[in-house]
Amino acid sequence: MKTTSDFLKMKVAGEKIVMLTAYDYPAAKFAEEANVDMILVGDSLGMVVLGYDSTMPVTVADMVHHAKAVRRGAKETFVVVDMPFGSYHGDVHETLKTAVSMMQETGADALKLEGADDVLPAIRKLTSAGIPVVAHLGLLPQSAGVLGGYKVQGKTAEQATKLIEDAKKCQEAGACAVVLECIPHQLTEMVSANLIIPTIGIGAGVEADGQVLVYHDMLSYGSHHVPKFVEQFSNMGQEASHGIASYVEAVKAGTFPAPKHFFTMKEETLDQLYGGVK
Ligand SMILES: Nc1nc(=O)c2c([nH]1)NC[C@@H]1CN(c3ccc(C(=O)N[C@@H](CCC(=O)O)C(=O)O)cc3)CN21
Ligand SMILES: CC(C)C(=O)C(=O)O
Ligand SMILES: [Mg+2]
């Protein structure tokens, strides 16, 4: 299994880090088999798996439930779990307690927290307690209400300067990597050059040290709105709906199940059952 120090080495060597989200056992297995470097159990599961229209309703219990399934499917891959909305903005001792239980219950390798500023003490606290932390800057879906929606961040010189400073502060606080979401690619280049820890981009250009995408987006598996930064690498949703439509048709037509799907009784048992007469 790769560790945080391998990710630092990959950055130095210029080897791209591939991260993919997963929310269940089969997805985790597929990711591990394809040599994904890091799996993210993202709170985006609230949207793509649970059908909410934001990540706000997702709870620690939801994250734990899905992360346990992912861990069972990918025992040899570095697994990062999102701390959900509202679970790390209270007292740092409370945050540490929540983080410890998330780590112990799921067997995760790291936790991810959105933001800098008042989140820095939590990053410091968790790291010093031995929990690797991935930071997350730029578009913060858990603050979409405050940001005014899912919009590109860091477009002005002032915002960009703040983001570079925030990234450095996250690194100083002990973060082992930082996710950069929806920022101009030139800013990604600057942040990446200013940090020792790797940057993992989503909608942040090719200059990041790694990339992350949401499983359901990159496979076109039922996610309704697909952001501009997504490439659809397969068409799973279409495969699924065609498969289900064929099943419905076959049952209605009586062509499924076919004899190869039947279980059959012996002739002599049938004779006993009928008492020799039908
Ligand atoms: N399915 C899914 N994919 C994601 O990547 C994702 C989630 N859900 N949920 C949590 C966050 C929210 N994310 C999103 C969602 C939408 C846009 C989006 O539509 N952005 C606009 C750009 C808006 C602008 O121009 O400022 C776009 O057209 O891509 C961006 C990030 C990323 N994360
Ligand atoms: C979009 C990624 C980075 C994320 O935080 C998630 O999937 O929840
Ligand atoms: Mg998230």
Image: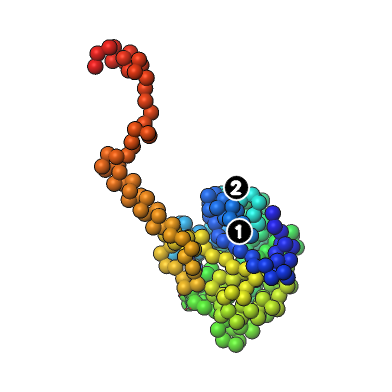
| Relative side of 241 to 193, left or right | left
* Residue at the image point whose x is 31% and y is 14% from the top: 271
Which quarter of the figure has residue 263? top left
Vertical position of residue 256 compared to residue 21: above or below: above
User: What residue is shown with label 1?
Assistant: 36
The quadrant the C terminus occupies is top left
Closer-to-camera residue (56/48): 48
Callout 2: 10 Å neighbours few (<14), some, many (20+)? some
First-in-chain label (2 vs 1): 1
Which amino acid is tagged 1? Val
* Residue at the image point whose x is 66% and y is 78% from the top: 191
The quadrant the N terminus occupies is bottom right
Image position, residue 186 (x, y; %): 60, 82
Image position, residue 94 (x, y; %): 66, 60
User: Is there any visible trace of residue 245 in the rendered image?
Assistant: yes
User: What residue is shown with label 2?
Assistant: 72
Circle on res. 152: none
